[in-house]
Image (cartoon, rainbow, N blue to C red):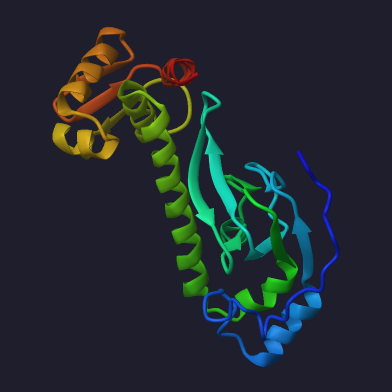
């Protein structure tokens, strides 16, 4: 992992930034922009620089001034899944800060980059000015975006049978021992949700039943042993 900054360069002013009109802070009042200028740090980094990694604590946000950054997840098998390529004017790390959670993906420079970094405590007064409803909705959107990205990784890297097992395990909830729940989707809807053919879903359900991991009664599913089921899913995903 490369961690050394390159040449020193003066940070661009938020008020006169060439990315004005695209960045998230462009609508702030002049005095607020001046406050960001005083609080931020500016860095230039080489290709290959890791800005943050999944599982790490979010200490601030990055505003990309130039270059391209790859946002990606690494699946259980170790395979990389690109989620997005960020360009000039884009924010990085904001989802973890706004959602008050750990980073759930990695960020790596794909070219030499220039970034402005804003500590999370600098943003706290701006976030506090928003209503409780807005803050609650933002956190909800963060959770939903993370769920969508997790499903993207599952679809691209896991077999349909493993995706189905993981879905059933989520519905069963945490803990050990048996669990019973009503399947909220039809076989066709379940196939659409998992990105698989209905025949594949039906075969996978039959296989799980044959292995005595689940029991089916119409739309009701009995997970016979959640701990054993979870272990089976984990082994199949590797």
Q: Residue at x 48, y 28 (%)?
A: 175
Count of residue discs: 0
**Residue 94: x percent and y percent?**
60, 61
* Residue 34, picture quadrant: bottom right
Residue at the limit of the structure toward the bottom, as seen here: 30
Q: Against 229, is 9 above or below?
A: below
**Residue 106: x percent and y percent?**
61, 44
Q: Residue at x 29, y 15 (%)?
A: 208
Screen quadrant of the N terminus: top right
Left or right of 39 in this view: 109: left
Q: Residue at x 54, y 57 (%)?
A: 86
Left or right of 213 in this view: 173: right
Left or right of 134 in this view: 69: right
* Residue 55, picture quadrant: top right
- Front-most of 87 and 123? 87
Q: Against 78, is 32 above or below?
A: below
- Front-most of 12 and 190? 12
**Residue 224: x percent and y percent?**
34, 17
Q: Residue at x 21, y 22 (%)?
A: 200
**Residue 45: x percent and y percent?**
75, 54
């Amino acid at each position: 992992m490369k961690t050394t900054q390159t040449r020193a360069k003066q940070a661009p002013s938020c008020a006169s930034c060439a990315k004005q009109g695209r960045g998230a802070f462009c609508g702030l009042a002049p005095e607020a922009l001046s406050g960001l200028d005083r609080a931020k740090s500016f860095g230039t980094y080489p290709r290959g620089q890791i800005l943050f990694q999944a599982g790490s604590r979010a200490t601030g946000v990055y505003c990309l001034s130039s270059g391209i950054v790859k946002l990606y997840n690494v699946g259980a098998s170790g395979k990389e899944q690109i989620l997005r390529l960020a360009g000039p004017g884009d924010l990085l790390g904001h989802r973890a800060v706004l959602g008050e959670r750990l980073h759930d993906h990695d960020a790596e420079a794909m070219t030499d980059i220039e970034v402005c970094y804003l500590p999370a405590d600098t943003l706290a007064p701006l976030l506090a000015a928003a209503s409780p409803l807005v803050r609650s909705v933002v956190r909800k959107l963060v959770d939903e975006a993370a769920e969508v990205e997790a499903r993207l990784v599952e679809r691209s890297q896991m077999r349909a049978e493993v995706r189905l097992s993981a879905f059933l395990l989520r519905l069963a909830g945490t803990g050990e021992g048996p669990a019973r729940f009503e399947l909220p989707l039809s076989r066709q809807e379940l196939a659409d949700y998992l990105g698989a053919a209905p025949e594949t879903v039906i075969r996978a359900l039959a296989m799980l039943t044959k292995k005595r991991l689940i029991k089916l009664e119409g739309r009701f599913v009995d997970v016979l042993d959640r701990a054993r089921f979870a272990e089976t899913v984990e082994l199949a995903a590797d």
